[in-house]
Image: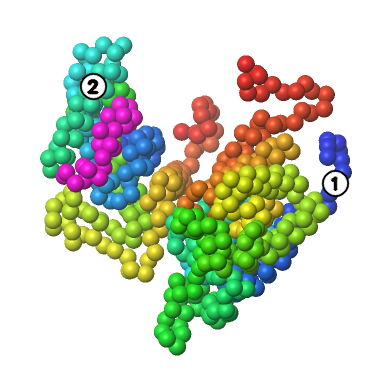
Amino acid sequence: MHKNNTYKHITQNGLWKNNPALVQLLGLCPLLAVSNTIVNALGLGLATIGVLVISNTIVSLMRKQIPTQIRLPAFVMIIACATTCIELLMQAYAFELYEILGIFIPLIVTNCSVLGRADAFASKNPVGASALDGLMMGLGFTIVLLANGALRELLGQGSLFAGMELLLGDWATHLRLSLPETYKPFLFAILPPGAFITLGFLIALKQHIDHMHQQRAEQTKAPVASGHKRIRVTDHIQ
Amino acid sequence: MPLMQLTSPHTKNNVSTQKMMLEVIGATLLGAGILTYHFGWGILINVLWASLVALGCEALVLKIRRKPISFYLRDGSALVTALLLALAIPPTAPWWLTLVGTAFAIIIAKQLYGGLGYNPFNPAMAGYALLLISYPVEMTSWLPPRSIAEHTQAHSLQGALQLFWSGAISTQTGLKTVDAFTSATTLDTLKTARTLSLTLEEATAQNPVLGSLSGWMVAPGWFWSNLAFLTGGLYLLKRKHITWHIPLSFLSALTVTASIAYYFKPTLGSPIFHLFSGATMLCAFFIATDPVSAATSQQGKLIYGTGIGLLTYIIRTFGGYPDAVAFAVLLLNLAAPTIDYYTQPRSYGHKKAKKGLHSL
């Protein structure tokens, strides 16, 4: 197995290094449209994880049979099947949430990160790695959705976990936390431009964390012995 | 030995950014004073608080960006942004409203894009649009102008401070919230009258805020403050801090559209009404002429101003918000680079550049 495809690497890539929402910036349409509350974000996130795992697994299983020339239509068919399954499941078990998310559940078919993973990873790798990649990419996407949803719900509605009973059953009504009533909801955060700005701040935060890590790594790195000639390939001396 | 720079411009104008910004601030003072006279101390409190917040936010971001703080603070651009935003916020605004708007204007609309000179949008209008979208109730509760209402507690310094601090005034009959004092602005009142399908005479009879000159409808309070901003704007023109292109094209576009509409449907408001209510004059001379976010070529400035004038009238009349200047300016800010691209003047000795469809 190639070094980049060890399970550890796949996990790191999906959750942080190559996060679909923060680094690849794929699937922004549902990310921005649906992340106005935590429950919406969680619903869409779970659906996307499901689709990613199923489609990556099937694509990986059939990668030897699908001719390269028509691979994209074939992938889209597989993804559409997976999405339909998830959609029917949601209709059966979380109908109200399904109604709220509306068109964005069927639109998972067109989520570029799903097709992107199918073409970039699953069509070239064995089943286990592909399924894990789908799971990790989906998780990375969902975490960003949740963070964005929490920020926007807190600012825009002054609450957290409102409406979780739509997804988790009646006991979840007690999860709801709200700010004191004197808080005036910041409506802008609920609207689409607010989503762009909160996502921008999340990306900035990720960059900042990476930057700090890099600086710390450079400080702790042992000083290079002088006198060696080194070939400079890129800006960074490895 | 370094060679002398001999490129144009050869004449040098002895105007620094700081001096220009200070003169812009000076030119708004008369208008700000008249607004304060008519709408109470709240206006002045807003201006002071917004300036404080703007300087604080600017210093904070400059510190994070590791830029020289006092150098950038002294150019006065943050103060101009704060002033323009504060003049557009109602006098009853609580402290957090001004804080949110000013912080957004300075931190996100200005500094995150790279600071003065790099912001694609007018920061004050970005802050205003954010507030209007987020807090529509707070942003539309203006006090009635002094000339038509008796001097309420909300107009006094003490009342304005209480409103600023807690959003309510304590009276002998108990706490009074903002709603007890406020009235809609003239533009809003006219719109409401139209939805009730009142005639112009009925509307002015019922709403003193619309003014008594029923033929022309000059709104009290608003008329004088707009006149003051016009005076300040003419001063800026005379000092050559702005050129005539944007104000003239903006005002004439607004006048022409309003005249045509007024001819067919008088309840839409006379051209004089549109020229002298809301933020028209403030926009024409102080907001739309922002040298950073406006179009730069002369032809481009004319197109830019005309666009703002048309959009202001359309959004004001048919849109859901009380005034439209902020949205019109932001939309044309977006269009400014494109306008500049297509109106680039020919430099001497060169053929006219082929742009757009002609270049095919």
Which one is closest to the eye, mark 1 or mark 2?
Answer: 2
Compared to residue B182, the image places residue A155 above or below, namely above
Task: Identify the image quadrant of the N terminus of chain B.
Answer: top right
Chain that bears disc 2: A
Q: Locate residue B244, reporting x and y percent.
A: 76, 47
**Alpha-carbon span between mark 1 and mark 2:** 68 Å
| Visible residue check, residue B75 | yes
Q: Which residue is mark 2?
A: A77
| Visible residue check, residue B326 | no
Q: Locate residue B169, reporting x and y percent.
A: 47, 79
Q: Locate residue B331, reporting x and y percent.
A: 56, 43
Asked if residue A5 is among those painted magenta in the image, a careful observer would answer no
Compared to residue B332, the image places residue B64 above or below, namely below
- Decide if residue B360 is on the left or right side of residue B108: right
Classify 10 Å Cα crowding around label 1: few (below 14), some (14-19), many (20 and above): few
Which of the pair A168/B322 is nearer the observer? B322
Which of the pair A193/B310 is nearer the observer? B310
Q: Locate residue B216, reporting x and y percent.
A: 65, 58
Q: Residue at x 26, y 11 (%)?
A: A67
Q: Which residue is mark 1?
A: B12
Chain that bears disc 1: B
* Prevailing SS of the magenta stretch: helix
Classify 10 Å Cα crowding around label 2: few (below 14), some (14-19), many (20 and above): some
